Image (cartoon, helix red, strand yellow):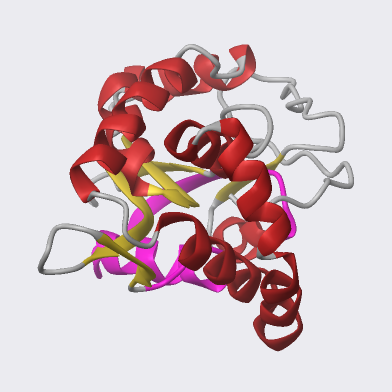
Amino acid sequence: MTAPREGVAAFDFDGTLVPGDSLPRYLARLLGRRRFASTLSACSPAMLAGYRSSGRDGAKAALLMRAVAGVEAARAAEVGESLSRVLAREVRPAMAERLVWHRDQGHRLVLVSASLGLYLQPFGRLTGFDEVIATALEVGPDGLLTGRIHGANVRAAQKAVLLKELLGADPVTVWAYGDSRGDRELLAMADHPTLLGRRRRLHRPSRPGPDSQAAIRPQWTDG
């Protein structure tokens, strides 16, 4: 008799679990709203150049270099912890129901997002995720952020690559939830993909259990 496969539920973050884009919220908390606004304005040319050379990854790298270089890593983590508590209260009701369903089924919960681990790691602990795959920032020997991303920006193909590395070679049944083209590869590797649509409405299956696909055209986000 064949042993049942392990169930894994992988969730995108921005626009899927919570509304909107969390990175500007984090940077505004870290820098203060006025300084963040001026930083965003000043680095717009660099972001545009980064986008032209390597798309969203390049634009994000340019923003982070200007915004967080020289910030104490301990303070950045403290701000992330604070934001995570707010975000944990903003999980969409329909997605909260899915999280409960997967936990009740004994499935492994994995958060997979291009957003920063500085707030996604504590968010994952608060909301019951087993693992968090998120974008990390490089810390220098002086304890300050260098402004560079450590490893990959966990977006698009990297989501599927890193989730496959985490899961290993053993066969598993994967549910995946996303809302943007940055989630295409993640959804493509899933046995049960769910794409949230333009109005961020989760398609309700006709039978119990989150195993349907929503085919409404999405809005595109990075997370």
Residue at left 74%, top 37%? 196
Count of all numbered marks drawn on residues in the image: 0
**Residue bounds of the magenta highlight:** 152-181
Residue at left 67%, top 27%? 19
Image coords of residue 42 (percent x, y):
68, 61
Say left or right for 152 vs 55.
Answer: left
Q: Nearer the viewer, residue 22 or 36?
A: 36
206 relative to 36, above or below: above
Image coords of residue 135 (percent x, y):
40, 58
Say left or right for 177 vs 46.
Answer: left
Say left or right for 118 vs 155.
Answer: left
Residue at left 61%, top 18%? 92
55 relative to 143, above or below: below
Q: Nearer the viewer, residue 7 or 197?
A: 197
Q: Quadrant of residue 213?
A: top right
Q: Is residue 222 visible?
A: no
Q: Is residue 204 magenta?
A: no
Q: Is residue 147 visible?
A: yes
Q: Is residue 176 magenta?
A: yes
Q: Which residue is most to the bottom?
A: 53
Q: Nearer the viewer, residue 127 or 55?
A: 55
Image coords of residue 202 (percent x, y):
73, 26
17 relative to 73, above or below: above
Q: Which residue is most to the left?
A: 141
